Image (cartoon, rainbow, N blue to C red):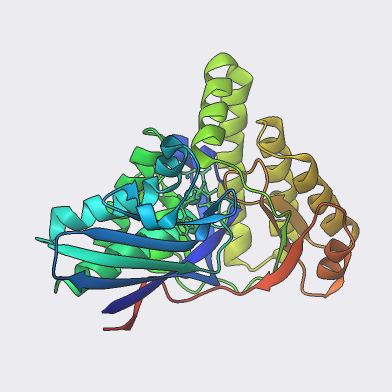
Amino acid sequence: MTVSSAPGKVYLLGEHAVVYGEPAVLCAIDRRATVTATARDDDRIRVQARDLTIDGFSVEYGDGVVDESANIDVPHPLIEAAVGYVDGAIEQVREVVDTTGFTITIESDIPLGAGLGSSAAVVVAAIDAATREMGVELTPEEIAQRAYRVEYDVQDGQASRADTFCSAMGKAVRVEGDDCRPIEEPPELPFVVGFDGSAGDTGTLVAGVRNLKEEYEFAADTVRTIGDIVRTGERAITTEDQRELGRLMNFNHGLLSALGVSSRSLDAMVWAARDAGAFGAKLTGAGGGGCIVALDPTPDTATALQYTPGCEETFRAELDHDGVRVESE
Ligand SMILES: Nc1ncnc2c1ncn2[C@@H]1O[C@H](COP(=O)(O)OP(=O)(O)O)[C@@H](O)[C@H]1O
Ligand SMILES: C[C@@](O)(CCOP(=O)(O)O)CC(=O)O
Ligand SMILES: [Mg+2]
């Protein structure tokens, strides 16, 4: 039995635009997906993902098909879509090791589809746990590369390397196209997360931005401007200027909103944070619903979010210096 875990992340700046080669800066946070891989005597792959619920049923399946015992009364395409990332991870493992079968159990404290990178964390931790279980130790960079393939396939060929690299490496990272690098000595930023309890589908949201960009030159300009914001933000990271970073986050959120990936509840949480005195606030990840991230060293933003209609949960997130790690072997 091998247990590995990998962190979720927040985007400080640059989501969506990073898919088209603009830079982005992300920070791993102290919320993790934990995957247990156990070798089996037969050649079955069995996946238990209790946090992955469809219409209230938790998913348990084998060989890519819902197991009879799971008794799930929903159409198979829905389930296949939901288990795409896990199936992709297993496919990657099978490219590396000669597997017989194994049981994969996934537990995660990263909300699904909320912009905190649950997909990347699950895929990264699953590849690490399952390959180790079969006696192969991949480097974090190799795991990031394989996890990226999975996100690329599930998101219909539109994915950046950002989430998977950040989850594999931990700390803060800068990603621009194929150029992925850790940020040495990242600042400890006072992240406050607001979660509206809903989810957005990354593939669909990415496709929406792509269509807009193809239709309007000013949408393509907007994507390039997000890149300019990130390049400006990098100076603020080096000088640890949180006020300046906050202003740039606000600008970034405005442009993401223009690209159609914000929502009423995300905007409400962003404004509640700003009104409470946060240095800045923006949605994180694909958007459409899910989480915002604000910078506020005081308790005021968290308090304001607790009273914001549409905000279901709020918590402080700390930078996680660890990327993928083995918990027990
Ligand atoms: N705990 C989990 N167990 C199984 N699959 C998960 C889990 N968490 C996330 N996933 C997979 O990741 C998908 C959500 O990924 P995505 O839409 O990219 O949002 P995000 O990465 O922002 O959380 C889920 O639909 C599911 O396929
Ligand atoms: C929108 C995007 O930039 C980030 C998606 O992040 P998440 O899956 O919502 O956590 C897509 C990508 O980089 O592949
Ligand atoms: Mg994702």
Residue most toward the left?
A: 98
The x, y position of residue 62, in whole percent, is 30, 55
Which is more toward the observer, 136 or 283? 136
Quick one: 292 or 245, which is closer to the camera?
Answer: 292
Q: Is residue 114 left or right of residue 42?
A: right
The percent position of residue 76, horizontal first and vertical second, equals 41, 38
Q: Is residue 44 visible?
A: yes
Examine the rendered structure and indicate whether residue 46 appears above or below residue 188. above
What x and y, as percent, mark residue 129?
A: 28, 70
Dividing the image into 4 quarters, which one contains the N terminus? bottom left
Of residues 306 and 246, the one drawn nearer to the viewer in this rendering: 306
Q: On the rendered structure, is 263 left or right of 80?
A: right
Q: Residue at x 45, y 52 (%)?
A: 71
The extreme top residue here reads: 215
Q: What residue is shown at x 22% (from left), y 66% (from top)? A: 102
Q: Quadrant of residue 255?
A: top right
Please name the residue shown 13% across and 70% down the image: 41
Compared to residue 211, the image places residue 278 above or below, namely: below
Residue at the far bottom: name it.
328
Residue ID at (83%, 66%)? 301
Give coordinates of residue 195: x percent, y percent.
71, 58
Q: Is residue 312 above or below residue 325?
A: above
Q: Is residue 138 visible?
A: no
Q: Nearer the viewer, residue 11 or 325?
A: 325
Q: Quadrant of the C terminus?
A: bottom left
